[in-house]
Image (cartoon, rainbow, N blue to C red):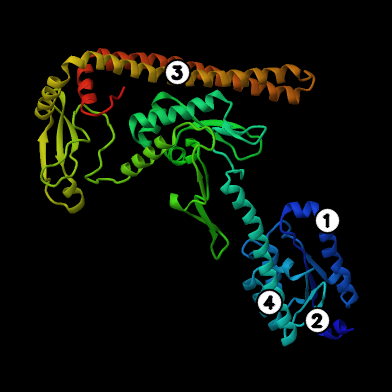
Amino acid sequence: MNESRKVQSHHLERDAYLYIRQSSMKQVVENVESTKRQYALRARATALGWPDDRVVVIDSDQGESGASAAWREGFRRLVTDVGLGRAGIVMGLEVSRLARNNADWHRLLEICALANTLILDEDGVYDPTSFNDRLLLGLKGTMSEAELHVLKARLRGGVLNKVRRGEYRCVLPTGFVYDESGAVVLDPDAQVRETIAHLFETFARVGSAHQTVKAFRDEGLRFPSRLRAPAAGVIFRPLTASAAMRTLRNPRYAGAYAYGQRVYSRTVDGKKTQRKRASEDWLACIPNAHPGYITWDRYQENLRLLASNGHGYDAARASPPREGSALLQGRAVCGRCGQHLRVRYREARGKLESWYVCDRATDSRAEPNCQSLAGPPIDEAVGLLVTEKMTPAAVELALEIRREVEARYEQADLLRCRAIERAQVDADLAQRRFMMVDPANRLVADTLESNWNEKLRVLAKARDERERARHEDGLAIDEALRGSRSGERVLKRACGRRPRA
């Protein structure tokens, strides 16, 4: 009876808006009774005097959380129509269906009060222009927001409890899978495992993520990437600098269980943002929790090396190995300013000459070069000095370098063989699918035949690339280790630099 007195003729002249929402798609599928109860409010509007065709149902926010209105299109439409004076009453099963955020809830109350629009829930009809009704609605909104906090705290507490024990299942990076018992193991795919191991070995050799990417490109190797789609498997694509950095910085590749490396939040417009936490602020970090591709100490060393590479022109930073004949490239330091000398090459008298140049001041402050020194005399003096110290071990060192270079090329060739094996498996599968189809069904048969031909082309390309790479590797070994520059590379190795094949 009290509800009927609140509904006036000017309310009935406008539409009745029924807002329906479930927090997740799982609730939409499983909590069907809640959905039925929300749709049943349509009968309440009819009983209060609204014709059935004047009841507007907004159910476009099914599966959306009520924590914010930023991503709820239906709620924004409801607020807009109320503000335009189109709604005589707004109906929701309870306050939590309309909003679980006090800012959104009180904004709706304010607009309803200005537009003289009623609010109806399962308990009754409320007039936002009435102080008592407005006070009660405000309390309901506060309780709804507090309830959401309690629910999240309970779920979060359970998750953090499992995280501290290292039992909470997270999305694994490429190269790891869960076995039948839920334990983390290395990917059973040999090509995936060997390619990831090759990345860490290459980084340990060249000392730079960018040079690692370049080495993969020069060797014609591709890096595995797991697709997000369910059961989509792993694809191989060219290695990028961002993928290399993610892999090198991920503690799971060192066999550590890590959780809470980032903090997620939402902006005013509803966009999700993230920021990284310092390693000491991670919610969990348990070394040796599962098998890894590198040791924990090697992982820490990789992080230190990446941080050192990011210091730019810091005088305390030693540059990673680069191409060129200069023996002290990345090692020589200017005696005047203390900065590392850059190496410049130029053609002179039919050969390539090196110069050690200190031009940091020129680049940053447009000042004259600090100094520049001819490379050959310095390299000759350093070479004589090193030769005096290393002559007894020079032959053994050269042989060791040869073995190292040959092993590196054999590892790259093994990865190319894995790619050929994968392409062969795909081609055989495409062939079996084509052979099993009914020949009369040309629409399907033509598609499967085209797919088989494509797989055969991929297989042929993989074989051709392997043969080309093997030929280039053989030439590279001959030039690098049997040519006239073998002694120079021995000297570079003695000066603390790795040879580049």
Tell me the CA gap for discs 2 and 3.
79 Å
Q: Are marks 2 and 1 in contact (CB under 8 Å)?
A: no
Residue 32 is labelled as 1
Position in image of residue 161 (x %, y %):
61, 51
Viewer-proximal residue, 146 or 207?
146
The residue labelled by disc 2 is 11
Q: Relative to 337, is 408 on the left or the right?
A: right
Q: Which of marks 2 and 3 is in front?
A: 3
Secondary structure state at the residue bearing disc 1? helix
- Residue type at mark 3 is Asp
For marks 4 and 1 on the same chain, the one whose residue lies earlier in the sequence: 1
Q: Which of marks 3 and 4 is in front?
A: 3
The residue labelled by disc 4 is 83
For marks 2 and 4 on the same chain, the one whose residue lies earlier in the sequence: 2
The residue labelled by disc 3 is 413
Tell me the CA gap for discs 4 and 1.
31 Å
